Amino acid sequence: MNHKSVTSKIYKTKSFIDKKEQFRHENFCEAIIDKETWDQAQFLLGQRSVIHPRSSNGNKLHRYAGILKCAECGANLTARTRHWKGSTYVQYSCNTSHRYGKEYCTPHTIREDMLDALLKDEMKSWYKHIISEGKRYEHIVKEWQRKKPVYDKKIQENEQKIEKTNEDIENLIMERLNDLGRKELYDKMINKKQKEVKELNRKNKELKQYNLVCKKRQEELDNFAEFLKEILAQDTISDISMRMVVNKILVHQNEDKTLDIKFEMNGKLGDNKEIEIPD
Ligand SMILES: [Zn+2]
């Protein structure tokens, strides 16, 4: 039998956004998992479910069916049961290679038990990552609370500015009426002031939202860490639990026939957007 070594690589996606942009980014504290999926997960975990996903024709689906993809040609890796020296195991290979031959794609063959072992390692490292993220958010919330008086003052200042600018706008409208020959100039000035008001309102909305949003994010991280902890406590990760967490697994075959396995998480977990407290 052709022995292949398997290496697991974790590719972390990091988005590099300008510091100001980071804070401006509306979804910087998006939910990791949407509410519906989360509730479903809680239900299934509560049931200690042993349900296996099935295909549309009612046949049992193989554990990694549909989520295991060839990184080279994009095809699914399809499962086959092998019998060898009295033991039975499942292995997956690139569908293109299997159906059309090795001149179209390399086999990308990987055994299911190997994927299981890699998955467990991967989940452990996600767990660690989430715990440290949770701590980071805790720190951010604390830092925010420390700075809160400064921000409250800033909000108040902005509100005063808004009031003042609105008065200016009213005055400009009156002046425009008395000086219609220079209407365009007044229009320009009014437009500029209106933009200023809009910007100040937006800033204040963000300043007020920040604390709430970060606390929510921290809570989600804690919940998800708890969820992963429960999964990891089980001897084998159930199909349902695995599919809750894993969106896609990409298999890349190197020239030396080793494989790189890339796990993609569901939801926003892979999204390590930095958040910063605004100045
Ligand atoms: Zn392929």
Image (cartoon, helix red, strand yellow):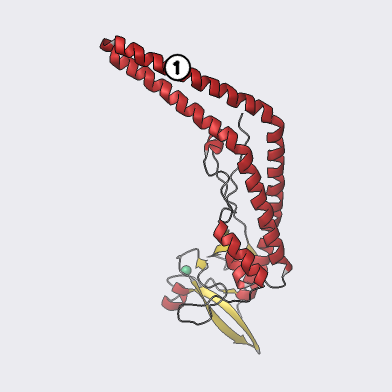
Identity of the residue drawn at 41% across and 18% down: 169
Which percent across, then down, holds residue 239?
Answer: 60, 72
Identity of the residue drawn at 53% across and 44% down: 27
Which percent across, then down, holds residue 83?
Answer: 60, 87
Q: Is mark 1 within 8 Å of ligand 1?
A: no
What is the quadrant of the N terminus in the image? bottom right
User: Pointer 1: what residue?
Assistant: 167
In front here: 136 or 91? 136
The image shows residue 225, relative to residue 54, as above or below, that is above
Q: Residues within 10 Å of mark 1 (few under 14, many from 20)?
A: few
Outermost residue on the left side: it is 181
Outermost residue on the bottom side: it is 86
In front here: 173 or 202? 173
Which percent across, then down, holds residue 205?
Answer: 54, 34
Identity of the residue drawn at 68% across and 61% down: 228
92 left or right, relative to 170: right
What is the quadrant of the C terminus in the image? top right
In front here: 71 or 64? 64
Q: Quadrant of residue 81?
A: bottom right
The image shows residue 257, relative to residue 31, as above or below, that is below
Q: How many marks?
A: 1
Residue 263 shows in this picture: no
Which percent across, then down, holds residue 51?
Answer: 59, 76
237 left or right, relative to 106: right
Residue 127 shows in this picture: yes
The image shows residue 189, relative to residue 240, as above or below, that is above
Amino acid on which the number 1 mark rests in the picture? Glu
Query: Please, what secondary structure does the residue beneath circle 1 have?
Result: helix
Q: Quadrant of residue 46?
A: bottom right
Identity of the residue drawn at 46% across and 24% down: 196
